[in-house]
Amino acid sequence: MSIDAVRVGQGFDIHRFTDDPERRLVLGGVVFEGARGLVGHSDADVIAHACADALLGAAGMGDIGEHFPDTDPQWKGVDSLVILDRVASMVRASGWTVGNIDCSVVCEEPKLAPHRDAMQRRLSDVTGAPVSVKGRRAEGLGALGRREGIACWASAVIYRVDSRSEI
Ligand code: MG
């Protein structure tokens, strides 16, 4: 196998906490029981959204807002892993293979470590590639430090195999 092309993409997302007790917190496809939820049109999974944007950016296929607009009722309350799964399929359909995705999540709460393995597994299952999730506190600085929300940065690598080398 010889690699024909490699591309990198970067994704960012941020969502504000809600006081709505009915709203569940979903991160990396995992429900955090008892934690404050995030405001959003979908389930507001910042990690899944950042991963999707990183993949779209790497493939030069626009961004998540373009493909899954928050004005479209079909995406209301949607499980964001469905969105990420669709994005990974679109990227693969363009001839790319997902190499890996690396995520940095910044928040003061909740603690991510207890769910880290489960998040990585779920994200890897839908993207077909290793996904790492790293949690960082905001050291009390700014909106994230004031516990107003959660942000995530993601980097994705995709590659294309030279089909001539498979003959
Ligand atoms: Mg989002």
Image (cartoon, grey):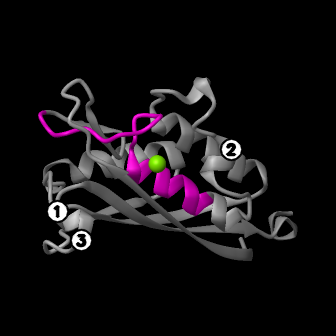
For residue 57, side relative to residue 110 (left or right):
right
**Label 2: few (<14), some or many (≥20) within 10 Å?**
few
Which is nearer the N-term, disc 2 or disc 3? 2
Membership of 46 in magenta stretch: yes
**Is 163 above or below relative to 121?**
below
Q: Position of residue 39 (x, y in %)?
A: 35, 40
Let me know if residue 108 appears in the view.
yes
**Is 154 above or below relative to 2?**
above
Amino acid found under the numbered disc labelled 1: Arg
Single out the mark in the foreground, 2 or 1: 1
Magenta region:
34-55
Mark 3 lies within 8 Å of ligand 1 (Cβ measured) = no
Q: What residue would you read off at disc 1?
A: 146
What is the distance, in whole Å, between disc 2 and disc 1 at their CAs?
32 Å
Membership of 74 in magenta stretch: no
Q: Residue at x 47, y 38 (%)?
A: 80
What is the distance, in whole Å, between disc 1 and disc 3 at their CAs?
6 Å
**Label 3: few (<14), some or many (≥20) within 10 Å?**
few
Q: Residue 67, which numbered label? A: 2
Q: What residue would you read off at disc 3?
A: 142
Quadrant (top left, top right, bottom left, bottom right) of the C terminus:
bottom right
Q: Secondary structure at mark 3?
A: helix
Where residue 61 sits, quadrant-wise, is: bottom right
Quadrant (top left, top right, bottom left, bottom right) of the N terminus:
bottom right
Q: Nearer the viewer, residue 166 or 137?
A: 137
**Label 1: few (<14), some or many (≥20) within 10 Å?**
few
- The answer to the question of whether label 2 and label 3 lie on touching residues, with beta carbons closer than 8 A, is no
Where residue 118 sits, quadrant-wise, is: top left
Q: Residue 20, which numbered label? A: none
Q: Nearer the viewer, residue 155 or 12?
A: 12
